Image: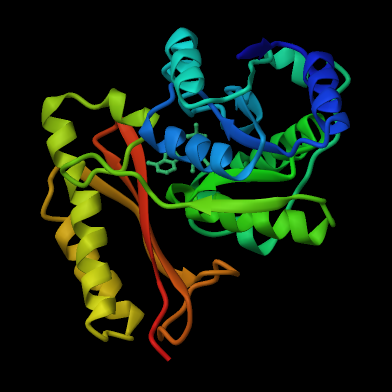
Amino acid sequence: MKIAYTVKEVREQVKAWKKEGLTVGLVPTMGYLHEGHASLMKKGVEQCDKVVVSVFLNPMQFGPTEDLASYPRDFEADCKLCEEMGVAMVFHPEPEEMYSPNFCSYVDMSVLTEDLCGKSRPVHFRGVCTVCNKLFNIAQPDKAFFGEKDAQQLAIIKRMVEDLNMDLEIVGCPIIREEDGLAKSSRNTYLNESERQAALILSKSIFLGKKMAEEGETDATKIVAAMTELIETEPQAHIDYVKVVDGLTMQPVDVIEGPIVTAIAVYINKTARLIDNFHFTPAE
Ligand code: AMP
């Protein structure tokens, strides 16, 4: 497995692969990789000849009061997992390699970025769109793999690729959970034992909402109310949002008539802000 630190190295390698007629898959990550990331790599290896994993803690997608400095890192373990998963190249640039001192070009998106995580993280999606655009230009992938765990991010990236005529396919991959239900996240490492238990309230509320939708509840406000009530039983949990939105536009819906995402963001004390969601499409 090759480890590339510069844009030039990635370009040269990808060019060589393309010359041989090989397809390229990209898995963008911020590192501290776990089984959720591994599931994206697995799908990449299944669908593409060569898989590139980017491990880049992108400063642009963190606000000034967010957890950039404390975000967990373990590049050695990341490389080990990538190698085990059959990844061909890891791209691990320094921020200076990605953002020159004169950098001033951004990809901004309206509508889809304004609610949910965009509301409490106002610079986040500008950073995500800009870095993904750069990574797509650098690695020239045929496909890029993203987790449904970040449902709004996935919808935004799909929209960006369509709106800006980018020549690649975005593949969504299901949420990977711990045995007890908690969605796997690099940020789970922030939690102490009691907070780790408290964090289960996220997946419990997701499973409750999903069950209600599957049993035919079409009133989104009732689902939100039930999920909110359940989360509020956990004293260490503080809700950022609980929302039912259209699966494509991420706009709030009152009545479930088509594909929806129910998305939540919950602070566990001041230790971590965790997200979770479920997709649901009513039967015809
Ligand atoms: P991150 O390193 O948190 O930026 O995540 C990189 C990619 O892995 C994103 O596309 C995430 O949606 C995806 N991902 C993170 N956690 C999970 C999970 N538990 N299940 C599936 N995909 C995930």
Work out whether 229 lies above or below 60.
below
Side of 118 where 277 appears, left or right: left
Side of 255 where 56 appears, left or right: right
Whole-percent x and y of residue 236?
A: 17, 40
**In the foreground, 262 or 266:** 262
Side of 201 where 112 appears, left or right: right
Please name the colour scheme applied to the rendered image: rainbow
**In the foreground, 36 or 19:** 19
Residue at 47% across / 76% down in the picture?
259
Residue at 38% across / 49% down in the picture?
175
View extreme (bottom): residue: 284
Where's the N terminus, which quadrant? Answer: top right
Whole-percent x and y of residue 272?
A: 32, 33
Work out whether 282 lies above or below 141.
below
View extreme (front): residue: 20
Would you identify the image quadrant in which residue 255 lies? bottom left
Where's the C terminus, which quadrant? Answer: bottom left
Whole-percent x and y of residue 204?
A: 18, 55
Would you identify the image quadrant in which residue 283 lies? bottom left
Would you identify the image quadrant in which residue 132 lies? top right
Residue at 70% across / 53% down in the picture?
169
Work out whether 74 lies above or below 84.
above
Number of on-image labels: 0
View extreme (top): residue: 76
**In the foreground, 190 or 158:** 158
Can residue 4 be seen from the camera position used here? yes
Can residue 99 be seen from the camera position used here? no
Whole-percent x and y of residue 249?
A: 60, 69
